Image: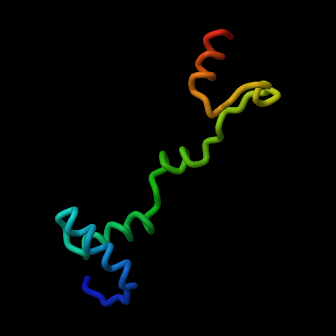
Amino acid sequence: MRTTLTIDDALLKRAKQAALRNNRSVSAEVEEALRITLLPRPKSDQRAATTPFKTFAGSGIQTGVDLHSNADLADLMDHS
């Protein structure tokens, strides 16, 4: 179907760049963006988004543990 849209200049420029990069038309880029945004997601995607993280009981970070030092963390794990 053919239609007319008013699109922000900067957004249209990015759509044109993406179209060139992907060797597609601007229409194809806009259609894909609408498809991603508006069509329902498969149930597997919805389940993944709502699956809670597993958590464990504990009192937090041990005293003296520096989470910014990979070497210190590795050393601590090796001696645990």
Camera-nearest residue between 39 and 12: 12
Please tell me how many numbered marks the rendered image carries.
0
The quadrant in which the N terminus is found is: bottom left
Please report the residue visible at 37 percent of the width from the left and 68 percent of the height from the top: 33
Picture layout, residue 40 above or below residue 56: below
Camera-nearest residue between 50 and 56: 56
Relative horizontal placement of residue 13, taking residue 53 as reference (left or right): left
Relative horizontal placement of residue 68, taking residue 59 as reference (left or right): left
Residue 38 position within the rendered picture, expressed as x and y whole percent measured from the top left? 44, 68
**Farthest residue, direction right:** 59
Picture layout, residue 45 above or below residue 36: above
Question: What colour scheme was applied to this rendering of the protein?
Answer: rainbow
Residue 6 position within the rendered picture, expressed as x and y whole percent measured from the top left? 37, 89
**Farthest residue, direction left:** 23
Please report the residue visible at 82 percent of the width from the left and 28 percent of the height from the top: 59
Please report the residue visible at 31 percent of the width from the left and 78 percent of the height from the top: 13
> Quadrant of residue 12 in the image?
bottom left
The quadrant in which the C terminus is found is: top right
> Quadrant of residue 31 in the image?
bottom left
Residue 4 position within the rendered picture, expressed as x and y whole percent measured from the top left? 31, 90
Picture layout, residue 8 above or below residue 27: below
Please report the residue visible at 74 percent of the width from the left and 28 percent of the height from the top: 56
Relative horizontal placement of residue 14, taking residue 77 as reference (left or right): left
Camera-nearest residue between 61 and 75: 75
Picture layout, residue 52 above or below residue 13: above
> Quadrant of residue 57 in the image?
top right
